[in-house]
Image (cartoon, grey):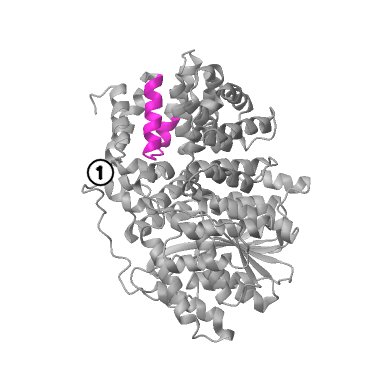
Amino acid sequence: LADFGAQQLSNTSWAFAKLMCLNLPLMDALSAAALPTMSELSQQDLSTTAWSLAVLELRDEPLLESLSAAAINTISAGAEFEPLGIMCIAWAFAVLEFSNGPGLDAIASQAIRSCHDFDPQALSLTAWAFASMRVLDLPLLSAIAAEALPKLHHMELHHLAKLVWAFSFLTDPFDVRNFLRQLLRAVAGALGQMNSPGAHSILWGLWQSGLRRPVFGLFRSWREEGVDPDDLTGALDLLLMDSEWRRQPGQEAELLGSLEASTPGDSVQAVVSKCMRGRAAEEAVAVHTWDRDKVERNKPELAKYLAHYPEMDRSAQPGAGNHWRKLGSLVEHVDALADLVTSPTMPASLLQLMERFAEGARQWLKVAGGAKAQLLQHMLRQRRWAPWEAALECGAFVGYSSIRLASVLGELGGAVVVSVEVDPVQACIAKHFIDLAGLSCQAEVWMGLFRDLLARLVEEFGLRAVGAVFLDYKGTAFHTDLATLERLRALAPGARALADNVALPGAPLYLWRMTRHPAWETSVWAMEEFLEPGVEDWLCLSALWQPPAPETPEAASAAALLDPAPAAWQRLSWHTDHMRRRAQGLRPGEMGMTSADRAAYAALVREAYRSAGVEAMPWQGAPPQPRRREDGRAAAAWPVWGGRQPCR
């Protein structure tokens, strides 16, 4: 590499990104060699380097800072970036969550000057990139809309979907609703290209924008136009959320019929069918078995790996792999033994049945059992509960913690439990188990994304009615979603918030906020993961002692003084999401995550916390940790994809 020029370094990184092969020692060496030569790169080489980093999900901050500075200098010197270069840099910054203000300003100004040369891909991806970073540059987006308008009916559907999603965040600065209507008309002419990601982006954008056109009506019109039901399954979570919220049982039953037809396994299908009973469906939608030809259409993020890792083909089908087989086995296990339990002991017995299942070989469930269950009950018993209050669980999974919450609250005054779950099949399983436990009157499961349902909480329960929040989903979203609950004034006096998985995989921005916020008193507890002896996780328990919303000048000043998380914690937050994607099998070039990998990454996260003065106390009185009937800590062999080892 010592003899490589700037362009050769850029081309080498591009080649490895094209092969989707992340070789960290090589990339570190390329980065070290490229830093001194960044000013020598052409605008094409700058965009190529940015694209390579984003494809490999390599958030090399010094290199990104240097790349941003070089782009600013190039633009300031009067050099014109090609549309492809502008698009690639903006897209890379969005993927890597690198919101460099001066760099984005320079890219936006260059895009405004040259967007008349943008093709549909450059228009849609540039708009998507700025919207995903919540950098709503109105002059830029206005210019993109003006340039896109005469081209809409010649655009492909995936370009239209990105534009709908991006512009749904705006609030009428240039009659954005008229632009969205024009986009929907163009979508109607491109229905032959419909796929699951596109359907979800378009329908969510319509729902988010507030246009007076129900998303279910648009979904039904697409079906009447002959769109394959397979190509709409990705939008069922949003449609079910909207139908539940609007109290439309007929629509809900029709959508559950679609869900049942696309759900793998007889036992899980039976659970979905049970949720559909009592709702008169106008028409059930037959969804056919997916085949490999539909992967590229409906799972583009997965399809791009298949050329390099053919063995991933089995993961391309919905319901493929161990996850749904395991949940089907869980349903069969609980249903078979639930009849042997007497009603008074049903909630506790049902939890024990789930735990016994999880102890079996290859049947581990990611539930908050053991010491985590103790802390969850402790949180509920810390405050007095009124019968009109609610406890909120974010991430129902199969309803394990929902049952525990409802059972304890039944003893404490009868407050209800609302559990939110984005996966509609898992939501149906959770509802089934809650019903078996005899707690359907005390606990309900809402389908949808938590951030989309926050306003429904206030609508249904009123202000200051949420007495506790259990955060058990994507840790990097905890801080923004809790802040939204505060702004909506949904939290009751003395409310409690408990965040799981703060160290594994991590919630650094949430932990930073809660340990420094003047309205919250926070303690951090360390304990072993359920059924993973030797794997330590942290939970963050907080008590609300004063209204956090800026209702007075004094409160607003206190909130403004809250120190932002340092750059190192921002980087850690991004890497937390990266490790989550790797654990889900979405980064095959980096191999899978073994138990040893999980423990090592958790140790790295904890060390970062300690370096900032945040330490956890061991949870006292934790129950003896049962072991699974296999050595869950044994390091697994690296998987072999397509007969070849991934690059190391």
233 and 396: which is toward the camera: 233
Q: Main secondary structure of the magenta part?
A: helix
Magenta-span inclusion, residue 634: no
Work out whether residue 633 can be spotted. Answer: yes
Magenta residues, as a range? Answer: 43-65
The residue wearing badge 1 is: 647
164 and 243: which is toward the camera: 243
> Of the residues shown, which amino acid type is indicated by label 1?
Cys
Q: Is residue 176 above or below residue 220?
A: above
Work out whether residue 98 can be spotted. Answer: no
Estimate the x, y position of residue 581 in percent, counting from the top left.
41, 50
Q: Residues within 10 Å of mark 1 (few under 14, many from 20)?
A: some
Estimate the x, y position of residue 490 in percent, counting from the top left.
71, 57
Residue sitting at x 67%, y 30%: 178
267 and 506: which is toward the camera: 267
| Secondary structure under the numbered disc 1 in the rendered image | loop
93 to the left or right of 447: left
Residue with the most extreme top position: 78
Estimate the x, y position of residue 593 in percent, counting from the top left.
34, 55
Image quadrant holding the C terminus, namely top left
Residue sitting at x 62%, y 67%: 278
Estimate the x, y position of residue 326 in percent, counting from the top left.
39, 66
Q: Is residue 463 above or below residue 125?
A: below
Residue sitting at x 37%, y 20%: 41
Q: Place residue 446 in its image quadrant.
A: bottom right
Magenta-span inclusion, residue 58: yes
Residue with the most extreme right position: 552
Q: Is residue 28 above or below residue 76?
A: below
Residue sitting at x 66%, y 77%: 410
Q: Place residue 363 in its image quadrant.
A: bottom left
Image quadrant holding the N terminus, namely top left
Q: Place residue 50 in its image quadrant.
A: top left
